[in-house]
Image (cartoon, helix red, strand yellow):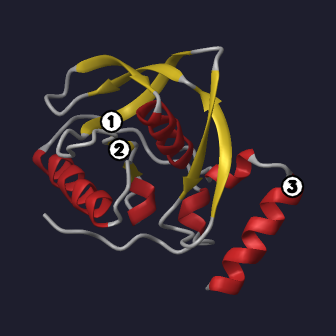
Amino acid sequence: MTARTCLPWPDKLLRTKAEGVAEITDEIRAIWDDMIDTMEAMPGVGLAAPQIGVMLRLAVVDGSTERGKAVRLANPEILHSSIELREHDEASPNLPGVSAKVKRPRAVTVKFLNEQGMVDRRDFVGIEATSVQHQIDHLNGKMYFDRLSKVKRDMLLRKAKKLG
């Protein structure tokens, strides 16, 4: 298990849709382990495989206060979103030093393959709901700032460029 390097924005892989996972193998479990180590090293509440250059539909989410409770998801798909929105300051290790307030559904129901290779379904609420939606965006080649207005997105990217 190792913390991996996150790709720097604007690496084109961050704009590429990840491939589906056919089955859960030891190799997939090892990637998840590295993703959890990488997430913990940031520290963050989630990570998607494309962020470390692995173009598979894999994500990890851990919004627990005590940590060590990461949910491992393959091929996550949102089945239901709450009408109620929640605003949260989002950021990405792929574009360090900047963040923006993003509104997303407060709760989501997600279907995914778990680490045993079984189809699972789970409700995520609050920070974990925000994180799982953020990770699914990454799996689809989107960044959190794509959800901002053009003016806010341009300001954020200019600020990141100055920091970089």
| Residue that appears at 30% across and 42% down | 62
For the C terminus, the image quarter is bottom right
Amino acid type for the residue under numbered disc 3: Lys
Q: Which circle's residue, 1 or 3, is located before the other in the chain?
A: 1
Q: Nearer the viewer, residue 40 or 116?
A: 40
Q: Secondary structure at mark 2?
A: strand
Give whichever of discs 1 and 2 has the lower sequence position: 2
Query: What is the crowding at mark 2: few (fewer than 14 residues within 10 Å), some, or many (at least 20)?
Result: many
Of the residues tagged 2 and 3, which is closer to the observer? 3
Q: Is residue 34 left or right of residue 147?
A: left
The residue where tag 2 is placed is 58
The label nearer to you, 1 versus 3, is 3
Give x and y (percent) for residue 89: 59, 49
Q: Are marks 2 and 3 in contact (CB under 8 Å)?
A: no
Question: Disc 2 or 3, which lies upstream in sequence?
Answer: 2
- Residue in the foreground of this view, choosing between 153 and 16: 153
Tag 3 residue: 150
Q: Residue 135 vs residue 163: left or right?
A: left
CA distance separating discs 1 and 3: 32 Å
Disc 1: which residue: 74
Tag 1 and tag 3, C-beta contact below 8 Å: no
Q: Position of residue 38 (x, y in %)?
A: 29, 63
| Occupied quadrant, residue 111 | top left
Q: Is residue 31 left or right of residue 85?
A: left
Q: Residue at x 81, y 67 (%)?
A: 155
Mark 1, residues whose alpha carbon is within 10 Å: few (<14), some, or many (≥20)? many
